[in-house]
């Protein structure tokens, strides 16, 4: 499995070179830098989050494991749900695994953005799974478990785990966190499913505890900054890494509107961290 993943990345990497030429050309023309994704779209999984796919050559790499890092209230669960909802609107099946959110409350929150998860569930498009970190630990030891059977039986193409923070905290030191993360991610990689994992951590916190172990093992890292400005907090997003992808290196402001996240077109020149 590992080998085939590497193969995919190499293939994607090969196409990136082609894009680099296009991008240089576009910026010479004085246009705003947007990544064309005509050629790579077949192997990409679109998020349909407004403006986001442009930044990552059309979408996540198919079947990759992606990590979304942000502090409390930064917008992680909304981002993750939007990633599923947009696909479910197009007939794909989504799975939401959570250790923290309670179903009723979560469905109500998402309804405020116009996303009726109960309805998707009724149509067989959505599965909400409340899980305990200890169950994941058992799953790693025994293999598979209910997450795997849902993915296989229902043909789920997108999975969210929100958040993996409490799972990581089951392990006391960085080495065992890293081993557990490796085991979890290699299991996820074996499933034909593109996954988005959230990690609750302030990216500007210098003493961050869990992400070092996890960040190393994932295919991509997206960071959300939720920072206090003069009178209010503002949200920003940055792609720290995405294997096989010539992604934007800039920082983009975004807002949460009536229908979820909207990434702004123009990056900012602020420096974080
Ligand atoms: N309907 C809405 N319209 C606009 N903004 C909203 C709406 N619903 C939530 N928000 C904003 O999004 C925030 C919550 O986003 P979300 O739940 O995705 O954050 P999170 O990073 O998952 O937080 P947590 O750490 O609690 O899990 C709220 O605090 C609020 O600022
Ligand atoms: Mg959340």
Image (cartoon, rainbow, N blue to C red):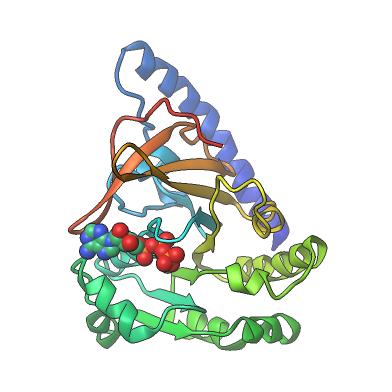
Residue 235 screen position, x and y as percent: 36, 46
Q: Is residue 121 above or below residue 65?
A: below
- Quick one: 78 or 193, which is closer to the camera? 78
**Relative to residue 187, is residue 69 drawn left or right?**
left
- Quick one: 130 or 206, which is closer to the camera? 206
Q: In this view, does 221 lie above or below 273?
A: below
Q: Which residue is drawn at 49% across and 79% down?
A: 151
Residue 93 screen position, x and y as percent: 37, 74
- Quick one: 218 or 107, which is closer to the camera? 107
Q: In this view, does 119 lie above or below 82?
A: below
Residue 218 screen position, x and y as percent: 63, 55
**Relative to residue 248, is residue 209 drawn left or right?**
right
**Extreme residue toward the front, this view:** 231
Examine the rendering and report whether any part of residue 152 can be seen: yes
**Relative to residue 202, is residue 218 drawn left or right?**
right
Q: Quadrant of the N terminus?
A: bottom right
């Amino acid at each position: 499995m590992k080998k085939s993943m590497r193969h995919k990345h190499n293939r994607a990497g090969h196409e990136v070179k082609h894009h680099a030429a296009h991008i240089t050309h576009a910026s010479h023309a004085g246009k705003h830098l947007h990544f064309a994704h005509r050629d790579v779209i077949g192997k990409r999984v679109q998020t349909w989050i407004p403006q986001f796919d442009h930044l990552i050559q059309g979408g996540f790499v198919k079947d990759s494991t992606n990590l979304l890092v942000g502090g409390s209230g930064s917008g992680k669960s909304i981002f993750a749900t939007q990633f599923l909802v947009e696909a479910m609107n197009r007939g794909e099946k989504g799975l939401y695994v959570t250790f923290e959110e309670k179903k009723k409350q979560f469905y109500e929150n998402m309804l405020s953005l116009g996303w009726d998860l109960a309805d998707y569930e009724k149509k067989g498009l959505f599965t909400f799974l409340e899980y305990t970190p200890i169950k994941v630990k058992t799953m790693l030891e025994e293999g598979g478990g209910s997450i795997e059977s849902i993915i296989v039986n229902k043909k789920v193409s997108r999975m969210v785990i929100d958040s993996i923070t409490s799972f990581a905290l089951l392990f006391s030191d960085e080495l065992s966190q890293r081993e557990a993360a490796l085991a979890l991610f290699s299991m996820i990689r074996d499933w034909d499913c593109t996954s988005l994992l959230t990690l609750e951590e302030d990216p500007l916190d210098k003493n961050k505890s869990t992400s070092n172990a996890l960040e190393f093992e994932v295919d991509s890292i997206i960071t959300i900054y939720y920072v206090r400005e003069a009178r209010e907090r503002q949200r920003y997003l940055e792609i720290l890494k995405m294997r096989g992808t010539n992604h934007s290196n800039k920082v983009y402001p975004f807002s949460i509107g009536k229908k979820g996240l909207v990434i702004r077109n123009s990056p900012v020149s602020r420096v974080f961290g």
